[in-house]
Every structure is written in structure tokens, then in C-alpha cells.
Image (spheres, grey):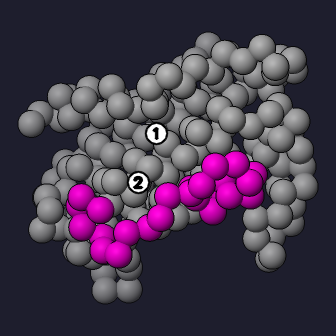
């Protein structure tokens, strides 16, 4: 399947059905704009991260560019686990359960579920939860705001997805092209 077709098909499933960003209970214009913008960018990063994962053939999921690194599949399991860790601080919904193995199918299912979990949390939370600044998601880190936790998920995903480029290049695979769609907000 051509890369463009993969990206288009993944984009179609980027946001869960029935999930609408409009919410009249959010009165702070900045918070509402931030939330809506994040949801749009999160859908793009989900699509791109899944495309990056899909670029590796099934037999490459255990591969490593260096023995000290995680396997390719383990990188995506790590991304999903971190998404879950950041979002459980809000106490909304139930984080998906990690798989036993890091096969392509298991990675796809868990990664998709973790992206959907982040989206679900942001859809279900109240404005005051996003703006709150005292979330303790790790005993070794200072408290975070709600926006901090979402930005950690976004940046952590980008960081490890960037590492996946090396895994693909070592196998002679050209990684998918990144896109960024400005929201105008």
C-alpha cells in the first residue's frame, strides 16, 4: 500500500466517532481554544505515529539499531505506556492495558487505544481540570498543570517517534512524511 493511502486510512480513524470538541461548559476562551487546537494536533500525531509504526514489516518489530536500545515495537509500547501515565493523573476513564508482547498487531492495538484514551480524557474533563496546576503524576517530579501533562504526552511521543526513524533507516525503509496542519487558533 502506498504511503499516502496508509496516511489517509489512518487519518480517517484518528478521532473516535461522536467526539466533538465543541463544549459550551468551557467559558475561558484560551482554555477552549487550547483544548480544541490540541485535539486537532493530537489527531495528526496519532496518524503520523501509527504510520511510522506501520512502515516497519512484522519481522522488524524486535529489531534494534544498537543492543542497548529498545526493540522497534518496544518503542511504541513505551509511547503508549507514557500516554497512559500522564492521563491517569486526571482520574478520568480507564487506561488501556499494555500487551504481553510487542508484535505489530499488539503495538497497533495498544498504541491506538492509548491515543484514544488521551482524546477521551480531554473530551471528558472540565475546564478547571485542564487549568489546575497541582497534578502529581510522579513522586520525583514537581506538580504539573493539566496543559503540562498533555504537552508531555505530545513531546514524549514526538521524541520516541523520532527515534523510530533511525530504526526504519537502518532497515532501508524510508519513513513516512510528517505533516503539521495549523489550526488557525
Quadrant of the drawing holding the N terminus: top left
- Count the marks: how many? 2
Quarter of the figure with residue 5? top left
Q: Residue at x 44, y 26 (%)?
A: 17
Does 164 sit left or right of 120 as displayed?
left
Closer to us: 113 or 102? 113
Label 2: state its secondary structure: helix
Closer to us: 166 or 14? 14
The main secondary structure of the magenta stretch is loop
Image vertical order of residue 109 relative to residue 32, above or below: below
Q: What stretch is highlighted in magenta?
A: 83-106
Tell me if mark 2 has few (under 14), some (14-19) or many (20+) residues whose alpha carbon lies within 10 angstroms of its own. Answer: many
Image vertical order of residue 59 relative to residue 183, above or below: below
Q: Compute the Cα span from label 2 to label 1.
A: 12 Å
Q: Measuring from the top left, give residue 128's x and y in whole percent.
A: 88, 36
User: Counting residues from the N terminus, which is met first, the one under dot 2 or under dot 1?
Assistant: 1
Residue 159 visible at all: no
Does 144 sit left or right of 102 as displayed?
right
Q: Measuring from the top left, give residue 92's x and y in whole percent.
A: 70, 48
Quarter of the figure with residue 62? bottom left
Closer to us: 53 or 165? 53
Q: Which disc is residue 111 wearing? A: 2
Q: Residue at x 20, y 28 (%)?
A: 4
Q: Which disc is residue 25 wearing? A: none
Amino acid at each position: 500500500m502506498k504511503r499516502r493511502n496508509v496516511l489517509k486510512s489512518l487519518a480517517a480513524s484518528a478521532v473516535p466517532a461522536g467526539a466533538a470538541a465543541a463544549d459550551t461548559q468551557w467559558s475561558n476562551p484560551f482554555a477552549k481554544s487550547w483544548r480544541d487546537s490540541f485535539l486537532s494536533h493530537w489527531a495528526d500525531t496519532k496518524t503520523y505515529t501509527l504510520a511510522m509504526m506501520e512502515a516497519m514489516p512484522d519481522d522488524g518489530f524486535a529489531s534494534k539499531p544498537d543492543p542497548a536500545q529498545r526493540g522497534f515495537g518496544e518503542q511504541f509500547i513505551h509511547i503508549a505506556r507514557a500516554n497512559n501515565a500522564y492521563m491517569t493523573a486526571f482520574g478520568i476513564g480507564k487506561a488501556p492495558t499494555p500487551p504481553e508482547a510487542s508484535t505489530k498487531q499488539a503495538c497497533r492495538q495498544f498504541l491506538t487505544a492509548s491515543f484514544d484514551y488521551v482524546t477521551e480524557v480531554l473530551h471528558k474533563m472540565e475546564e478547571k481540570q485542564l487549568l489546575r496546576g497541582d497534578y502529581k503524576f510522579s513522586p520525583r517530579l514537581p506538580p504539573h498543570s493539566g496543559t503540562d501533562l498533555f504537552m508531555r504526552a505530545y513531546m514524549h511521543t514526538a521524541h520516541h517517534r523520532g527515534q523510530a526513524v533511525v530504526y526504519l533507516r537502518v532497515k532501508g525503509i524510508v519513513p513516512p512524511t510528517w505533516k503539521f496542519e495549523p489550526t488557525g487558533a
